[in-house]
Amino acid sequence: MNRRADTGDALIITFTCVFSGIETPVGESLKETTKLQNLRKDLLESVKLIQTYGMEVMAGFIVGFDNDPPDVFDRQIAELTSATVADQARPGAAPQPSLIGAACHF
């Protein structure tokens, strides 16, 4: 978020990024885990819509379901690369507010 100096005494906060958990691109895995809401819209279109509002999209990639094939990581990265999604989550890593803050330009 940014503090805008041009507002006099008013404090206006603007957000410049959003964090989203982006799950497997495998439809069968989403059905298996009843994540049917993730099948309603195209993931890439949704990410790009958020970006049209000037928001940077950072994501934790959620994969490893029973129906995910061995190439699921490559498929997910290939799909999201064209949307320029920042990868902020690593398996087993605890959230680091300082990293998120730096990436969001606080």
Image (cartoon, rainbow, N blue to C red):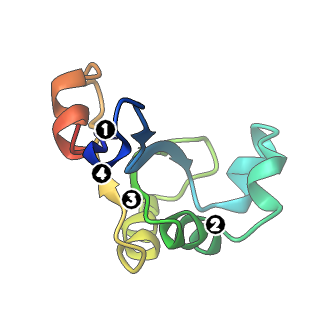
For the residues labelled 1 and 3, the Cα–Cα distance comes to: 13 Å
The residue wearing badge 1 is 89
Tell me whether circle 2 and circle 3 mark residues in contact (CB < 8 Å).
no
Judge the density around disc 2: few (<14), some (14-19), many (≥20) Cα neighbours within 10 Å.
few
Q: Residue 104 carries which label?
A: none
**In the image: residue 32, left or right of residue 55:** right
For the residues labelled 4 and 1, the Cα–Cα distance comes to: 6 Å
Tell which of 24 and 96 is nearer to you: 96
The C terminus sits in image quarter: top left
Residue reaching furthest to the top:
94
For the residues labelled 2 and 3, the Cα–Cα distance comes to: 20 Å
Q: Earlier in the sequence, mark 2 or mark 4?
A: 2
Residue 104: x %, y % from top left: 27, 44
Disc number lying in front (1 or 2): 2
Residue at 21% from the left image edge and 45% from the top image edge: 105
The residue wearing badge 4 is 87
Tell me whether circle 4 and circle 1 mark residues in contact (CB < 8 Å).
yes
Q: Which of marks 2 and 3 is nearer the N terminus?
A: 2
Q: Earlier in the sequence, mark 1 or mark 3?
A: 3
Is label 1 in a helix, a strand or a loop? loop
For the residues labelled 1 and 2, the Cα–Cα distance comes to: 20 Å
Q: Which of marks 4 and 3 is nearer the N terminus?
A: 3
Q: Residue 73 carries which label?
A: 3
The residue wearing badge 2 is 46
Disc number lying in front (2 or 4): 2
Residue at 42% from the left image edge and 31% from the top image edge: 10
